[in-house]
Amino acid sequence: MHLTNSSPTITARDRHLLRHAALAVCCAGLFAALAALVQTGWSPLARLDRELTGDLHRYAADHTVWTASVQMFSNIGGTIAMRGVLGAVALWLCLIGARTLAGWVAAQTLIGWGGQWVLKLSFGRHRPAFSDPVSHADGPAFPSGHAMASAITCAVLVGLLWPRARRAGRTTACTTAALTVLAIGASRVFLGLHWTTDVLAGWLAAGIVLGAVTVIVELARPGALARDFRRVDWRTRPRVQRVLVSSDRPPRGTDPSEDLAEDLPDGPSDDAPADAPDDPAAGPATDPVPDRPDGLLR
């Protein structure tokens, strides 16, 4: 009698689905709680919004040069620029044949844009109002479109780099993405265009979109995202290796051994195969194993 383990096996794909489903559910719960507190006007949260936004506005009004630089950074990290980056990435993925991955990137962009406006129009929260504004923006405030778009864009880019990067590269990518998202969100509050809770809501809404879209694509096309990640790795890695190998080789004409070889008299090459032995019993000569200069690329 053989005893077998009847417990189900959790595959890597199952863990992938569970992580993204948990991300979407947790962010949805936190977003709902934050929205309820904002809508009911919970006094501690409302006071935090007013005091922090007011203090930052006064600082921005007194430091015009710094405010202009923050305004430029906010424009660079705006919703149009971020969606343009993802659109270019989706087009490149489609051209190299990673169509499921391209659709995943495009879905993150479009659903994020549509969801942003559905939420804005549903809540209809007014932006901060000042008698001496340092910047201007239209539309409802909750959630912040800049915060939402930057979080989606940076998370997608880090996700595309993650399988091909080592630990140092992953740490650098995550740190750069986190600082970018935080800086763009802070710039909206600093310019008096959003309340602090608007930015927090934008980040939570981005988490909902990222997790939900990934789960939907995985369920609709099981394993297709992983195959496309391998395709991207296969298409990009040889180019990187060629650049690394060519950079290690000295330019032609700069190696002193080349000049020395030109001065030597003509004669038999050391690399030429040896003549066959006169003794038949010795057997045929064996060819030396050829060098493989392309071994780094294989």
Image (spheres, helix red, strand yellow):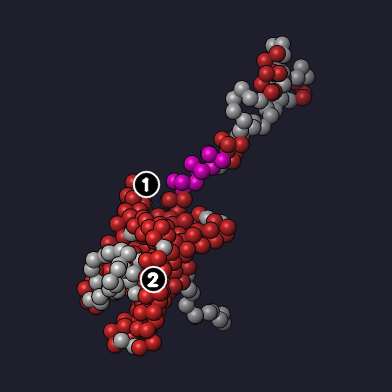
Q: Is 102 or 225 nearer to us in this picture? A: 102
Horizontal relation, residue 281 to residue 227: left or right = right
Check if residue 89 falls in the magenta segment.
Answer: no
Residue tagged by mark 2? 58
Rounded to the nearest angstrom, the CA distance separating label 1 from label 2 is 50 Å
For the C terminus, which image quadrant?
A: top right
Q: Residue placed at 34% from the left, 74% from the top? A: 195
Residue 207: horizontal and vertical position, in percent?
38, 71
Picture quadrant of residue 279:
top right
**Residue 205 in sight here:** no
Q: For the residue marked with disc 2, what is the amino acid? A: Arg
Q: Residue at x 56, y 80 (%)?
A: 2
Question: Which residue matches tag 1?
Answer: 96
Location of the N terminus by quadrant is bottom right
* Residue at point 39%, 87% (across, down): 44
Under circle 2, the secondary element is: helix
Front residue of 176 and 225: 176
Q: Tell me: residue 230, above or below residue 270.
A: below
Asked if the residues shown at circle 1 and circle 2 are in contact, with their CB atoms under 8 angstroms apart, the answer is no
* Range covered by the magenta-colored residues: 234-244
Q: Nearer the viewer, mark 1 or mark 2?
A: 2
**Rendered image quadrant of residue 222:** bottom left
Percent position of residue 145, x then y: 31, 66
Mark 1: amino acid = Ile
